[in-house]
Image (tube, rainbow, N blue to C red):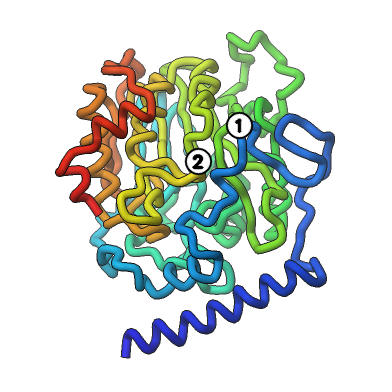
Amino acid sequence: MARALKIIGGILLLLIVALGLVVTIAPRFLDRIYYRGDRSDHYDGARFFNPDGDQDTLRMPAGGGRAGFFWRQLTGDDGRPVWPAAVPVAASRPAARIMGNRMVVTWIGHASVLIQTHGLNILTDPIYAERAGPFGFGPRRVAAPGVAFDDLPRIDLVLVSHDHYDHLDQAALGRLWQRDRPAIVTSLGNDSVIGQVGAKAMGLDWGGNATLTVQGLEDTSTDIRCDPDSWCPGDRARVFVTRNHHWGSRWFTDRNRALWSSFVVALPDGGNIFFAGDTGFGDGLWPAEAAAYGPIRFAMIPIGAFRFAPGQMRSGSHVGPAEAVLIHQRLGAARSMPIHWGTFRLSYEGYLTPPRMLAAAMRCTGGTGFAPARIGVPFDVPPYAAPRAGRRLDPGAMLRCLDTPAVRALR
């Protein structure tokens, strides 16, 4: 019976995919123009692109064509390891505020993280949807949110990395806006998507920045009111929109109409916060660009959704643990937390493969400071102290180090 339901569901999904392909070829009314602006080294006047190359983000990750990929995603008929239908979550109710230099972090799940410090409540890519996809389709979450929406403290700042459904949850953003009116910072074009639910967001280009003051959010990309190395009275945080390597789409025809990004949040003291969003490795230079804004006390780096074929260690738009450790090194982060795993099944690796492979990759470098957290369990991040980076490896050397029977056994 279960297999029959999967087949029926697969047929329905293929019909939807076929309809999407028809409207891609015929009338393009499902296209959306999220942004208009001048050409740049990553915008051709119509769509954004990765300046370090797009070939790896354009290919279907597992081969066999788009229809075959969606069929395998829906049915799981490809020998993938079984995931749990649900995992226990120790949900918590965070404090209203954390004052001073103390920093408390709670992983809500996937790329949703609550960071509390300096009297600020910062939330990244808040997703509370049961499924990560349009019209009720898409992977179902196996882990409930680590903080119930109604238990979230008043949110001051929201970072939205790009427009994929597992990162930009319009319903959650609409509810946050109605409840708290937070400052929302994103990259170009995503402010239009967020605006569809009545929420106001500031969309900035890579290299742009905004300052959160006691009066609100100001775009300070071209006009920093004080010396960049100092803080004006009333400044609470400064957000820098930084490069990463990904792509964007809400539907078949709007690919790369909005930009993707990572973020650095600079605070008055104690070190910066880095949020990688969703990213592949690309040229591997962008972590150093983020680190140039100052020492990173706490970073959030994805480690999941990297395996679409047996033995695969990365995909073009998603780093696996091997490259995530290299990003942690290149950031010089004192403490990094892995995200983008264990909530939605987006690829073929086993449920616990990402954290187990992360531990092996950290042993390869001998570095410190990059280890998993539990969903819903708050933890303190110490003040910044220079990390032990360990042995510097390039991607090839890391893969050679991980070519062991133990790692090969991880499916």
Tag shown at residue 279: 2
Quarter of the image with the C terminus is bottom left
Question: Dot 1: few (<14), some (14–19), or many (≥20) neighbours within 10 Å?
Answer: some
Q: How far across and down, in percent of the image, does residue 406 sit?
A: 15, 43
**Viewer-side residue, 197 vs 95:** 197
Q: Is residue 392 above or below residue 317?
A: above
Q: Nearer the viewer, residue 64 or 61?
A: 64
Q: Quadrant of residue 218?
A: top right
Crowding at label 2, few (<14), some or many (≥20) Cα neighbours within 10 Å? many
Give amino acid for label 1.
Asp
In the orientation shown, which residue stands out farthest toward the left? 405
In the rendered view, does 389 fall on the left or right side of 268? left
**Is residue 39 found left or right of 14 in the rendered image?**
right
Query: Which of the labelled discs sits on residue 52, or is there none?
Result: 1
252 left or right, relative to 304: right
User: Which of 346/130 is in front?
Assistant: 346
**Disc 2 secondary structure class:** loop
The percent position of residue 103, horizontal first and vertical second, equals 37, 29
Could you say whether the residue bearing mark 1 is in a helix, strand or loop?
loop
Residues at badges 1 and 2 in contact (C-beta under 8 Å)? no
Can the viewer see residue 82?
yes
Residue displayed at 33% across by 64% down: 142
The answer to which quarter of the image holds residue 98 is: top left
Q: Which tag, 1 or 2, sits closer to the chain's start?
A: 1
Residue 57 appears at what percent x and percent y? 56, 46
Give residue 393's position: percent from left, percent from top.
33, 22
Q: Is residue 107 visible?
A: no
Q: Amino acid at mark 2?
A: Thr
